[in-house]
Amino acid sequence: MRSVKIDRSEPLELHRQVAAEIRRAIAEGEAKPGERLPPSRDFAAVLGVNTNTVLRALRELRDEGLLEFRRGRGVTVTGTPRQSAVIERARELVTFARAQGYAFDELVQLMHTVK
C-alpha cells in the first residue's frame, strides 16, 4: 500500500481518515484480497497516531466485511474493490438521508421500494 495520509486539520475523525485511506487502497487494487496488512502498531507509528486509532479504523472495516482478523495471522483483506465502492456509496446515502431527516429504519423501508 502506498502511504496513507491523514490530515489533523480536517474535521473528519482520525480513525475515519485511516479507514478511508485503506478503503481507497482496496478499491484501487493496492491491497488485494488475501493480502495481510501491516501490524497496527507499525501502522500507527508511521502515521504518528495512537495504536487504538488504527485499531478502531480496522474494526470499522472488518464490520463492513472488507477485512478479517485472524488470531496469530494479523489482518487480511477480504473485500473486493467493487464491494468497497458499494459500501462507500451506501455510507454516503445514509449520511444524506439522515441530513434530510430520515431515520435509518425509514431509509431501509425506502430501499425496499427501489428494485
Image: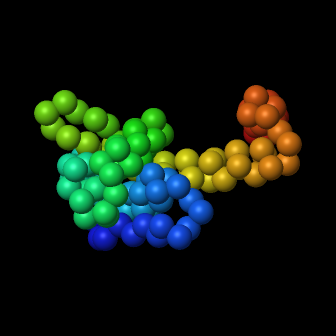
Color theme of the render: rainbow
Q: Position of residue 4 (x, y in %)?
A: 35, 66
Query: Is 10 positioned to the left or the right of 34 in the image?
Result: right
Q: Which of 28 and 17 is in front in this view?
A: 17
Query: Is 42 positioned to the left or the right of 31 in the image?
Result: left
Q: Is residue 111 above or below residue 36?
A: above
Q: Residue at x 20, y 55 (%)?
A: 42
Residue 82 in view (yes/no): no
Quadrant in which residue 62 is drawn: top left
Q: Position of residue 17 (x, y in %)?
A: 47, 59
Q: Residue at x 45, y 41 (%)?
A: 60
Q: Is residue 10 above or below residue 103?
A: below
Q: Which residue lies furthest to the right in this view?
A: 101
Can you say which quadrant of the picture contains the N terminus? bottom left
Q: Nearer the viewer, residue 14 or 22?
A: 14
Residue 68 in view (yes/no): yes
Q: Which residue is drawn at 74% across and 34% down?
A: 104
Can you say which quadrant of the picture contains the C terminus? top right
Q: Position of residue 19 (x, y in %)?
A: 44, 53
Q: Which residue is drawn at 20% across and 40% down?
A: 74
Q: How many discs appear?
A: 0
Q: Which of 45 and 101 is in front in this view?
A: 45
Q: Position of residue 64 (x, y in %)?
A: 48, 40
Q: Which of 55 and 98 is in front in this view?
A: 55
Quadrant in which residue 70 is drawn: top left
Q: Residue furthest left?
A: 72
